[in-house]
Structure formats: structure tokens, C-alpha cells
Image (tube, rainbow, N blue to C red):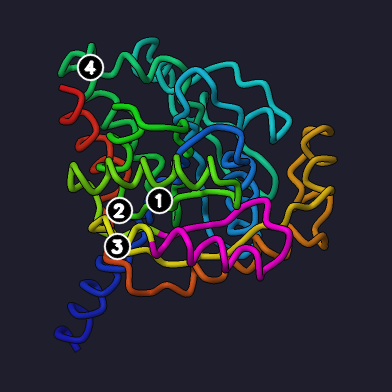
Amino acid sequence: MLDQADKLRKLASQNTNAASKPRIITITSGKGGVGKSNVVVNLAITLQKMGKRVLIFDADIGMGNDDVLMGFLPKYNIFDIILDNKNIEEVVIKGPFGVQLLPGGSGLSRIEDLTEEQRTAFMNKLNSLENLDYILMDTGAGINRSVLGFISSCEELIILTTPEPTSLTDAYSLLKAVSHFKLKNKAEVIINKAMDEKEAVITYNKFNNAVSNFLKVKLNYLGMVSDDRKVVMAVRSQQPFTVIYPTCDASKNIISIAEKLIGNSSQSEGTGFQGFFKKLFNIFS
């Protein structure tokens, strides 16, 4: 009986540890205007509706708009936690269905100026955010040190592009940098603003052929989001389209993408939010 009780305690401990290691996914794009933040917000809400605990980290320096898409005006951001001794609970915003949003703010560009004491205090505060299943990192668009730093520090990478040639070219350039610096050897792809599944698949195949021929990055098609008029209407009303139009084509597409993410059981256990920021701080030191 004692042996059995000991095994149960160990199993409970393993489950607790596993629960404290969320999947950290960086979602980025080669250029702005492709609808990345909109996809991130609605994907997070959909995962939350499916019973997952999700936090969005708006890591778009100076241009973050996840809060606007969710109809909020945040009072604080991550640097109020670091510099003004705010608690995580004071800064994190609760969104639809309980999804959480941590605004990054323009202060992310000052990471390299933080003292060791400030970094340690911040890392300790992150403990309260570890009871999550997913952390979606919404980065800025393009190729810069901040975006590459987030890609390097996360466990999974999703590239969002559209069928437009300029969007595909910029997405390829981003992956070229990822390959050159050996940051990741695989990535998922979402094709946004596609007329239909056929156009999305053709677009992905064209993109995948170029990447597989010239870069050392393996791609996987995660899905598409329709060029749906309801998406534009939702943005104008500052409400996520999966909330205000849950049965529209784009919402159905997001559900499909969320199901694929959840069904991907091959992912290894992550390092958690603390581990992520430890890597990020090292990069910007």
C-alpha cells in the first residue's frame, strides 16, 4: 500500500508539473496588414471555448492591437510589472470566455536595459501565470531583432501569410532569416484571407516548394481563414468575429485550426513562461 501511495504521489507531481508547462507558440508574419493579430485573438478565444487555458502575450512593440480587437484599453503593460512593481493580476486583462491578455507595450525594446535584480523579480512573478495550456505570442511583423528573439525563445512557430505575392515573398524572407540563424527547423503555416480552401492549398504548396528547395525549414499546413466579410464587420465593431459571428466561415476555419493544434500530441513538454523569458533575456543581454 505504501508503494502504491508513493507512486500516486509521484504521478500527481508529474501531472502538476506538466500542467505548469504551457505550449508557447509564436505567431508571426513577414509583413503587416495580413490579419495576424485578428487570427491570434480569435484562435485564443476558440481554444479557450474548447476548455483550454489560454493567454495572449501582445509582443508587437509599439504597434500591438490585440486589446483593440478585443474591445479593451489596457491601463498597464508588462513593464509596469517590472519597473513599477505591479502584480501580474493588475496587468493581465480577462477577455471573452476567460482568455487572458498580457500587453507587452513599447517597453519591450528596453529589455536589454534591465538589471539582473529586475529580471529575477519579474521571473518570480511569472509563477502566477504558469497554470496555462497555451501562451500565444503575437509578435510584430517583419524581420527584426525582437521578432527573431521571440522565434528563438518559443517552442513552436506559426507563420501567417496571405495569397498575395508580396505577403508570400516577405514570409519567405522571414523564414530565410530563421533558417540562416538556425532558430527553428520547422514551422506551421496558416493562409489568411483566402477565397476558398483550393486557393489556400495552392498558395501553401507554392510557398512550401520554395522553402523546401532553398531553406532548411520543414513546413506543415495548419489551415486557412476565409476572406470573410464578417471579419471586417467584427473588427469595425471591436469584437472578435468568433464571438459576434460564431458560425461564419472564418470562425469555422479557426475551429478547424484549433482542433489541429490540440490534436498535435507530438509536441515535447515546454520550458514554461519563466523558461521562455530566461531565453529571451539571454538573447537581449
Q: Earlier in the sequence, mark 4 or mark 3?
A: 4
For residue 213, the mark is 3
Q: Earlier in the sequence, mark 2 or mark 4?
A: 4
Q: Earlier in the sequence, mark 3 or mark 1?
A: 1
The foreground one among 223 and 284 is 223
**Residue flagged by tag 1: what amino acid is it?**
Ile
Q: Which residues are magenta?
A: 188-209
**Residue flagged by tag 4: what amino acid is it?**
Glu
* Residue 138 place in picture, x, y as percent: 48, 38
Residue 283 found in image quarter: top left
CA separation in Å, label 2 and label 4: 22 Å
Q: Mark 4: give few (<14), some (14-19) or many (20+) Cα within 10 Å.
A: few
The residue lying furthest to the bottom in this view is 1
* Residue 234 place in picture, x, y as percent: 81, 41
* Residue 275 place in picture, x, y as percent: 23, 43
The foreground one among 246 and 222 is 222
List the residue tagged with mark 4.
112
